[in-house]
């Protein structure tokens, strides 16, 4: 066998191994997305059930009897479940989906990094499942959201890659600023609430308003990433 033929055989073997690895990543990604979908679906369902049964799960309240604060808290939970689920799935697909695998297998496409990213996404899903039980406990509700945003912020700092152009860098900075300010505001409000002798509920209502504002700004900043058809797809 000549050098040229040997080189062709080696290239063919490498290509076959690369395709097999890409197929493995695709299969694992599909399974992991299914797991997250189940947990987030249960969290959303429980959020609504907790509202309409007033956390008793025995009888349903009439629509006119639903507490306004409970409705608002539930809306915040549901919108953020959609936000985190859709954003995390888009993020995973952009790193490990078919286009990324077909382009090239890099360290960002390895099963090890997929496992790390999934661990964080799954952890966030579990936090949402816990939050769905606490819409009636204002302090715990805000504390859990504070933990959720802090985990997401740290994850993105650790895995953040330099943008390919100035617009991507600008998006990363705006996303970071939005979430850092939200974490600081929630921490301050939660600390004030815990140290107030009456645990004034207004502080927690303001905190939930901060979460709602953070969510609205996030959708505005990352609209192109969440919904590519509506604009330029930003890097997460």
Image (spheres, helix red, strand yellow):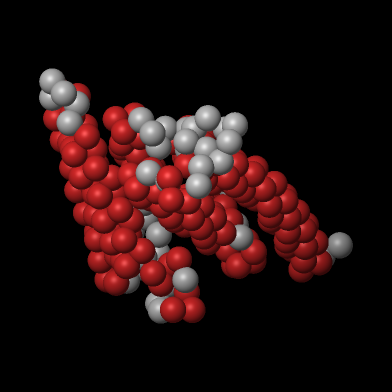
199 up-or-down from 19: above or below = above
The reply, left or right, for residue 90 in relation to residue 26 is: left
- Relative depth, front residue between 206 and 154: 206
221 up-or-down from 135: above or below = below
Q: Is residue 10 visible?
A: no
146 up-or-down from 21: above or below = above
19 up-or-down from 113: above or below = below
Where residue 99 sits: x, y (%)? 60, 67
The reply, left or right, for residue 216 in relation to residue 97 is: left
Instruction: Residue at 27% x, 71% y: name it.
Output: 166
Where residue 215 sits: x, y (%)? 33, 56
Instruction: Residue at 73% x, 55% y: name it.
Output: 23
The reply, left or right, for residue 122 in relation to residue 65 is: right
- Relative depth, front residue between 7 and 42: 42
- Relative depth, front residue between 15 and 20: 20
| Quadrant, the N terminus | bottom right
| Quadrant, the C terminus | bottom left
Number of dots carrying numbers: 0
Where residue 142 sits: x, y (%)? 31, 36
Instruction: Residue at 61% x, 60% y: name it.
Output: 97
Where residue 149 sits: x, y (%)? 34, 42
- Relative depth, front residue between 89 and 95: 89
């Amino acid at each position: 066998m000549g050098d040229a033929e040997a080189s062709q055989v080696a290239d063919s073997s490498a290509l076959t191994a690369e395709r097999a690895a890409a197929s493995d990543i695709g299969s694992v990604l599909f399974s992991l997305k299914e797991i997250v979908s189940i947990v987030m679906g249960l969290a959303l369902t429980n959020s609504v059930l907790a509202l309409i049964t007033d956390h008793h799960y025995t009888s349903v309240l009439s629509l006119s009897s639903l507490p306004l604060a409970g409705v608002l808290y539930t809306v915040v939970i549901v919108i953020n479940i959609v936000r985190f689920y859709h954003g995390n799935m888009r993020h995973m697909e952009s790193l490990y989906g078919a286009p990324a695998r077909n382009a090239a297998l890099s360290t960002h496409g390895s099963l090890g990094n997929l496992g790390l990213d999934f661990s964080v996404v799954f952890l966030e899903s579990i936090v949402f499942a816990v939050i769905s039980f606490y819409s009636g406990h204002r302090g715990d509700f805000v504390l859990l959201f504070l933990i959720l945003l802090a985990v997401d912020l740290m994850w993105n700092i650790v895995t953040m890659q330099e943008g390919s152009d100035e617009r991507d860098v600008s998006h990363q900075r705006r996303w970071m600023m939005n979430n850092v300010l939200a974490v600081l505001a929630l921490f301050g409000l939660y600390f004030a609430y815990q140290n107030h002798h009456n645990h004034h509920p207004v502080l927690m209502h303001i905190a939930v308003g901060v979460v709602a504002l953070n969510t609205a700004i996030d959708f505005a900043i990352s609209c192109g990433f969440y919904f590519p058809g509506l604009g330029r797809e930003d890097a997460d």
